[in-house]
Image (cartoon, rainbow, N blue to C red):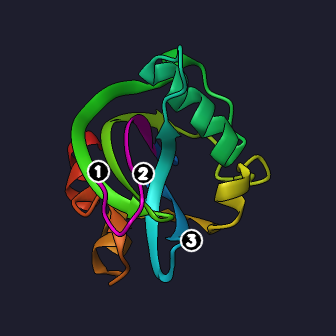
Amino acid sequence: MTHGGGRHIDRRAARVLLLDPDGRVLMLHGWDPARPSHTYWFTVGGGVEPGETLLDAAVRELFEETGLLFAAADLVGPVRSDTVSFPFDGSWFSQEQSFFVARAVSTAVDLSRLNEVEQGCIDEARWWSVDALSSSGERFYPPDLPSLLREVA
């Protein structure tokens, strides 16, 4: 199945609701390289590599996308699993994703370990309160993130 001439990619992903001591969630701001005007905020996380467990992928993605080191035992979850479909960079993804919760003691974030694709389409990291996210008018994924955050708080 293809959309827009691109290829179809099935993947598993580990996403992380990274919460600071005030209960705010870390969101990354980016865009689809094929549609640069389509900007959005999204949670930390990414695809599971061959041989990795979901938990391993969550810990790795946390480090790569924030510079923060966590042990697998520091994460809770998965607190939710679902499947989403979305276009990205000319391909169509069908992604089975599982969300974990991690609690950061520091709000300092280092984006220097982003991979080449991420460096080209992520420009900011910001800590969001549930209320700020709900009232922001910004596009974010998952779209029901405020209710998910209230469930795990």
Q: Which one is in front in this view, the residue at disc 3 or the one at disc 1?
A: 3
Q: Position of residue 123 (x, y in %)?
A: 66, 71
Most foreground residue, 5 or 13: 5
Magenta segment, which residues?
1-17
Q: Amino acid at mark 3?
A: Pro
Element carrying mark 3: loop
Label 2 neighbour load within 10 Å: few <14, some 14-19, many 20+: some
The residue that mark 3 highlights is 33
Q: Which tag, 2 or 3, sits closer to the chain's start?
A: 2
Q: Position of residue 64 (x, y in %)?
A: 68, 40
Q: Which tag, 2 or 1, sits closer to the chain's start?
A: 2
Element carrying mark 1: helix
Q: Check contact, mark 2 vs mark 1: CB within 8 A.
A: yes
Q: Quadrant of residue 5?
A: bottom left
Element carrying mark 2: loop
In three-dimensional space, the C-alpha distance between marks 3 and 1, rounded to whole angstroms, equals 28 Å
Quarter of the figure that contains the C terminus: top left
Q: Amino acid at mark 2?
A: Gly
- Residue 10 painted magenta: yes
In the drawing, does residue 43 fall left or right of residue 126? left
Q: Position of residue 70 (x, y in %)?
A: 61, 27
In the orientation shown, which residue stands out farthest toward the front? 5
At 46% from the left and 65% from the top, the residue drawn is 90
At 28% from the left and 73% from the top, the residue drawn is 134
Q: Quadrant of residue 141?
A: bottom left
At 71% from the left and 53% from the top, the residue drawn is 108
Q: Position of residue 18 (x, y in %)?
A: 48, 44
Q: Which mark is residue 149?
A: 1
Q: Amino acid at mark 1?
A: Leu
**Vertical placement of 24 versus 61: above or below?**
below
Q: Which one is in front in this view, the residue at disc 2 or the one at disc 3?
A: 3
The residue that mark 2 highlights is 23
